Image (spheres, rainbow, N blue to C red):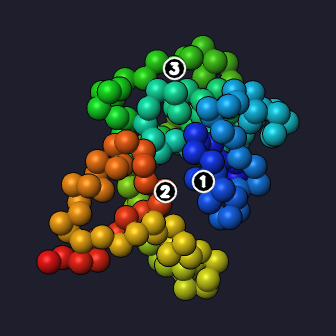
Amino acid sequence: MIAVDIDDQKLEMAKQEGAIATVNAKNENVPEAIQEITKGGAHVGLDALGIKDTVLNSVLSLRKGGRHVQVGLTTAEEGGFVSLPVDLITAFEIDFVGSIGNPHPDYQGLLNLVASGRLNPKRLVEREVSLNDVNEVFENMTQYKTKGFNVITKFS
């Protein structure tokens, strides 16, 4: 896995979770860096942010026959529309796949990974919050200030 972000702390977290390489999009041309690291492009690019730059970087980082996975929707600013290089997508036979959630049949496999210790989701929890903190958490998310999951554990 190659992690791409503009925050060095988040990139360091990705390394700790197993990323073999990181690319800081503030300092590097993402598609060029990934093409070089992978010697020809990534097999799969995954974007969970939904802004035009991250979607485009993912698509441009793919090799022929690659697959872009868009996790979740675009931001309000994009309004569901992102300009993409359709000729390149066609010429490189790139798959563009959308995913909005985790299907029920996948839960058991995911839980097995947690039970075996191969996956430790607790390491990705930035903080536990109360229901009263939800507005602050959403505000931080919209400003890209979170560095992990914020989990509601207090409901009163």
C-alpha gap between disc 3 and disc 2: 28 Å
Question: Mark 1 or mark 3, which has the lower sequence index?
Answer: 1
- Location of mark 2 (residue): 147
Residue at the outermost bottom position: 115
Circle 2/circle 1 CB separation < 8 Å: yes
Is 102 located above or below residue 36 in the figure? below
Q: Residues within 10 Å of mark 3 (few under 14, many from 20)?
A: few
The residue at 59%/74% (across/down) is 119
Q: Does residue 152 appear left or right of residue 105 in this picture?
A: left
- Location of mark 3 (residue): 84
Q: Which of 130/37 is in front?
A: 130
The residue at 64%/18% (across/down) is 88
What number is the disc on residue 9? Answer: 1
Which amino acid, mark 3? Leu
Residue 34 in sight: yes
Residue at the outermost left position: 156
Question: Mark 3 or mark 2, which has the lower sequence index?
Answer: 3
The residue at 46%/18% (across/down) is 83
The location of residue 58, given as percent across then percent down, is 60, 34
Question: Mark 2 or mark 1, which has the lower sequence index?
Answer: 1
The residue at 76%/33% (across/down) is 33
The location of residue 60, given as percent across then percent down, is 64, 26
Q: Does residue 87 appear left or right of residue 83 in this picture?
A: right
Q: Residues within 10 Å of mark 1 (few under 14, many from 20)?
A: few
Which amino acid, mark 2? Lys
Which amino acid, mark 1? Gln
